[in-house]
Image: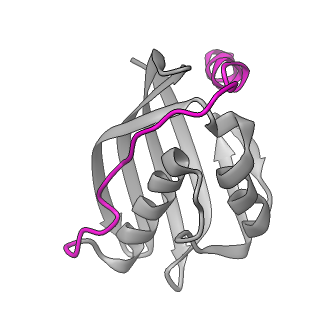
Amino acid sequence: MKQVAVASAVAAAALTAGSGSAGAAADPTLSRNEAMAMAYLDALVSHDASAVRFTPDATRVEAGMQTGYSGPQLSNDLEHGVQYRVVQRIREVRLSESGDVVTARYLLDSGVAGIRLMTVDIAETFAMTDGAIHTIVATITPT
């Protein structure tokens, strides 16, 4: 129930765009899969999914609920989804990789009209196929 409330609060606050960046997508020390995970995080802030590759049948689960059903839908959501308009900044990104799975842990600041309303701690696990995102599982925890 707590996870649903957090997801609902974030979605309800999605009224205006924020600005900021995860800022590490161009890091040459990242593996191909880590760079793709960072491209996704950057797109959460920039709303430009042009650098993010999804498999056609990619899925996303957030707080136990499926929120993504295909690569094209996930790309469209990153670029136009109202649920991401509250994202102002992503910071303190920590990546780990095991085989074709990348886990990103980070803080996400969200708000409206340039005013930060809340920060959440997010862990997203990306399963990759040939350098493209196949599945994302996100866990969101209020800080």
Q: In front: 19, or 87? A: 19
Q: Work out which residue is located at the far left of the displayed protein and give it.
A: 29
Q: What residue is drawn where x is 55% and y is 43%?
A: 138
Q: In this view, which residue lies farthest toward the bottom?
A: 130
Q: Quadrant of the C terminus?
A: top left
Picture residue at 40% right of the left edge, 60% below the top:
38
Q: Quadrant of the N terminus?
A: top right
x and y percentages locating residue 105 in the rendered image: 36, 44
x then y, percent, for residue 21: 38, 46
Q: Is residue 23 magenta?
A: yes
Viewer-closest of 88 and 130: 88
Position of 116 compared to 66: left or right? Answer: left
Considering only vertical position in the picture, is 10 above or below 132? above
Image coordinates for residue 125, horizontal then vertical, percent: 48, 54
Examine the structure image and report whether residue 77 is included in the region drawn in magenta.
Answer: no
Instruction: Examine the residues drawn in magenta and state their main secondary structure.
Output: loop
User: In the figure, is residue 75 to the left or right of 36?
Assistant: right
Question: Would residue 46 be found to the left or right of residue 8 on screen?
Answer: left
Seen at 38% across and 39% down, the residue is 90
Residue 23 higher or lower than 97, as above or below: above
Q: Residue at x 75, y 45 (%)?
A: 67
Give the magenta part as a residue range: 1-29
Query: In the image, residue 29 lies at what x, y percent?
Result: 19, 73
Placement of 98 over or under 114, stated as above or below: below
Q: How many marks?
A: 0
Q: Nearer the viewer, residue 19 or 12?
A: 19
Quadrant housing residue 26: bottom left
